[in-house]
């Protein structure tokens, strides 16, 4: 009996927590007579509820292969204008200039961020020149006027802001008149110096732990990782202050960062996000706030906005 | 100029975000005329504000060395009674029985959990027998009566509960009459099957992403990782459903899990946590809610309870 008890524990956990893994097979989504898990609601969403992500809003980041020779590719969705648009324009320009190629991930701090850019940036003699024409950036652009934005409110309490919700497939927070991008797991932001220097976009980081929301409105959020986050989250932590790598050999070299729209059409990855204005998303949000699928005993009647991520799926094009 | 701009960005970020790394040198903590960072408040806390963690409340988890031969040791602080005490007693019994030795980490799911236990638990013929005398566990024990507990409230909004704060060095949430352990980054919980099976404590997991607070009161939280979390968070993600490893060779073998109190005195690691009833903690909590150190532009006037972790420090014993 003891044997079977231990076994049942592991097995049932694996099945019942499946609700948290998006993109399960339809078979799993069809357990009769049980309230649907969030993933099952997403799997059942009609085609009309999905929005294509423009290839010019997608960064394809390729790292050198890992120790076992496996490719490492990370897909980043850029924040839609008008959010952080000076930075996202700069990021597109840097990608078009192949600026990050052969630069590196310079920092990996546990429960905080992985950060990449020019390891020689400190040294004017060796730092890589930025492309011409980058936009100046200012702190004022950390917040965006809310008027005229299609905002989907999330009916949840938030520890950091008066209101939270979604615009253009991204989680945002705000007050009566403004909205801003927020720091969740996988969010991508712009390293910067002291004010009024607000960063160019050449130095980026991705959040690898609990959302450091105190950075909201203090650093520009320019996107989020929608695929391949594990290639950043599993990087060895740097042993220097703040997780910077002490030995250059510890850094992971970036093979390239490109806009999907710059790739040959056949190589462009295609993604869609679930429209936050859709009925499917409303059901998904409610299910994230009140887990009623069989594993759960006590629905929370609430959720952290960072625990209600906008579902994203990869679209596999049919081969002729 | 462009060179120096990029350089300054990286340098200043590294210095100013240092506020988030606890245990900095006193020199860094003494920047004149600037509001202290949370880490600086912690570094300045008097000895009297620190509480020793009982060695019988500390698990020492040793994994096989990593690919480069480096030791991997993880320190877990157990929840104080009466929280989850049936499970924490079981966990102590399992550690005393050396039950986990040569078992493995069986699952690593990105932005969710790393989980360990008996890989053969599914198979009654090969599963490892549990030690005799484990306590039965029931869901009712996921919540604890609040009466007579020394609760330090955190003055923050919470998306999941009426109130949040601290007991015995741990973050907890609650309602008018009860309190319960919560799922933050590094929290350790008990895998279980369907109700009323509430898990023995033999199957454990640690949170490696944004706190999955919807698991609160649905699974027992029995502790938190206070050192060495990077050895769990950087594990390769499993490629099976829910991050289970598909190939047994991908699992990381556990060398041992022991109570610190079971180790020879000279080998017992010593830790302290900052008393949440102390003035130092009140200042630290306020600084986490309102970052006023120089890097920050806009204090949030709030924080997620998971972003106000109770500081823990290792005590290095003087050698004679």
Image (tube, coloured by chain):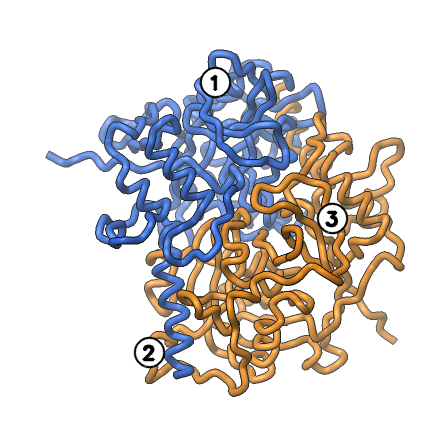
Chain colours: A orange, B blue
Q: Foreground residue, B30 or A294?
A: B30
Mark in front: 1 vs 3: 3
Judged left or right of residue A250, residue B238 is right
Q: Is residue B140 above or below residue B65?
A: above
Assess whether mark 1 and mark 2 are in contact (beta carbons under 8 angstroms): no
Q: Is residue B254 above or below residue B235?
A: above
- Residue identifier under label 1: B89
* Quadrant the C terminus of chain A occupies: bottom right
Secondary element at image label 1: helix
Secondary-structure class at tag 3: strand
User: Residue, x 65% and y 39% (percent of image)?
Assistant: A157
- Quadrant placement of the N terminus of chain A: top right
Residue at 87% from the left image edge and 41% from the top image edge: A30
Which chain is indicated by disc 3? A
User: How many C-alpha atoms fall within 10 Å of the one at disc 2: few (<14), some, or many (≥20)?
Assistant: some
Q: Please state which of residues B110 and A109 is positioned toward the viewer in this rendering.
A: A109
* Residue B264 appears anywhere in the view: yes
- State whether residue B217 is above or below residue B238: above
Residue closest to the far bottom: A132
| Disc 3: which residue | A153
Q: Residue at x 52, y 53 (%)?
A: A208
Q: CA distance from mark 1 to mark 3?
A: 44 Å
| Numbered label attached to residue A123 | 2
Residue A76, how many percent across, how many down? 63, 65
| SS at badge 2 | loop
Left-right relation of B174 to A236: right
Q: Nearer the viewer, mark 2 or mark 1?
A: 2
Residue B137 picture location, percent across and down: 60, 17
| Nearer to the camera, B310 or B105 | B310
Question: Could you tell me if residue B255 is visible in this image?
Answer: no
> Numbered disc 2: what chain?
A
């Amino acid at each position: 009996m003891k044997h079977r008890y231990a076994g049942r524990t592991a097995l049932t956990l694996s099945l019942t927590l499946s609700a948290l893994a998006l993109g399960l097979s339809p078979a799993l989504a069809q357990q009769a007579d049980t309230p649907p898990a969030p993933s099952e609601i997403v799997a059942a969403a009609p085609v009309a509820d999905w929005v294509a992500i423009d290839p010019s809003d997608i960064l394809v980041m390729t790292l050198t292969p890992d120790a076992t020779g496996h490719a490492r590719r990370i897909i980043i969705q850029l924040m839609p204008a008008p959010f952080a648009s000076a930075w996202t324009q700069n990021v597109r320009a840097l990608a078009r200039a192949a600026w990050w190629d052969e630069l590196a991930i310079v920092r990996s701090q546990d429960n905080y961020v992985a950060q990449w850019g020019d390891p020689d940036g400190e040294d004017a003699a060796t730092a890589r020149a930025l492309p011409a024409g980058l936009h100046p950036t200012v702190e004022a652009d950390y917040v965006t006027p809310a008027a005229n934005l299609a905002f989907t409110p999330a009916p949840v309490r938030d520890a950091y802001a008066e209101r939270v919700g979604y615009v253009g497939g991204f989680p945002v927070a705000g007050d009566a008149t403004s909205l801003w991008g927020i720091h969740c797991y996988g969010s991508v932001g712009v390293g910067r110096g002291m004010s009024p220097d607000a960063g160019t976009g050449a130095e980026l980081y991705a959040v690898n732990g609990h959302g450091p929301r105190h950075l909201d409105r203090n650093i520009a959020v320019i996107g989020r990782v929608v695929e391949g986050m594990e290639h950043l989250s599993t990087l060895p932590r740097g042993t220097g202050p703040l997780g910077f790598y002490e030995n250059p050999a510890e850094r992971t070299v970036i093979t390239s960062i490109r806009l999907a729209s710059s790739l040959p059409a056949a190589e462009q990855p295609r993604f869609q996000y679930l429209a936050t204005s859709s009925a499917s998303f409303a059901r998904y949000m409610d299910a994230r706030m009140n887990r009623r699928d069989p594993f759960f005993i006590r629905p929370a009647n609430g959720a952290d906005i960072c625990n209600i991520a906008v579902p994203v799926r990869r679209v596999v094009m049919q081969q002729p």
